[in-house]
Image (cartoon, rainbow, N blue to C red):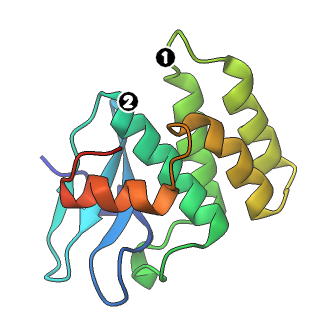
Amino acid sequence: MPPAADRVRAIGRLAPGGAWIGFAATPSGHRLVVGEPDGSTRVLPAGDQATRAGLAAAASAYFLASLPPPPPDLEATHADVAGLVTSLARSRPPDEDPAVTVEVIDAIDDGLPGDAVALRLAALLPPGADPVALLVELATGAEPR
């Protein structure tokens, strides 16, 4: 069952006028959501490292403003993305250093520039990963690198 529309927040479009990528808060945590140009949405599978990296990539893309603008009625706010990052901190895998998400949350709370927040979020991505490329791969079903 898809998340309620009032819980879905869009980060940006994958191409001008095309599908958008965002996230939804669900009882089991945040999930990536893709909105198609025809108005349909799909929730991407959850529970693996690619999902976690995708959520971190979405937050990074938000702070870098690296995607074309999303639909205005679904546009994520700073508070929405802060909630996403807080959720990532709560669901941290045992092998992840808790200081990583604490640094990101502190950077958001302190109002640091977007690139400074994104730099901290990079620690939650696969080494060398480009946040936008990762989001496109996840949204199109390609195997993330």
**Which residue is painted at 52% across and 66% down in the image?**
76
Mark 1 Cα-neighbour bin, 10 Å: few <14, some 14–19, many ≥20: few
Q: Quadrant of the C terminus?
A: top left
- Picture quadrant of residue 112: bottom right
Dot 1 and dot 2 residues touching (CB under 8 Å):
yes
Q: Left or right: 95 with respect to 29? A: right
**Image coords of residue 6 (percent x, y):** 35, 62
Q: Is residue 4 visible?
A: no
Q: In the rendered image, which residue does mark 1 sit on?
A: 93
Which amino acid, by three-letter code, is at mark 2? Gln
Mark 2 Cα-neighbour bin, 10 Å: few <14, some 14–19, many ≥20: few
**Which residue is painted at 17% across and 78% down in the image?**
39
Residue 7 vs 25, above or below: the answer is below
**Image coords of residue 54 (percent x, y):** 41, 46
* Residue in front for this viewpoint, 99 or 125: 125
**Image coords of residue 86 (percent x, y):** 60, 36
Residue 110 vs 113, above or below: the answer is above
**Which residue is painted at 25% across and 51% down in the image?**
3
Q: Left or right: 5 with respect to 10? A: left
Q: In the rendered image, which residue does mark 2 sit on?
A: 49
Name the mark nearer the viewer: 1 or 2: 2
Numbered disc 2: secondary structure = helix
Which amino acid, by three-letter code, is at mark 1? Pro
Outermost residue toward the top in this view: 94
- Picture quadrant of residue 27: top left
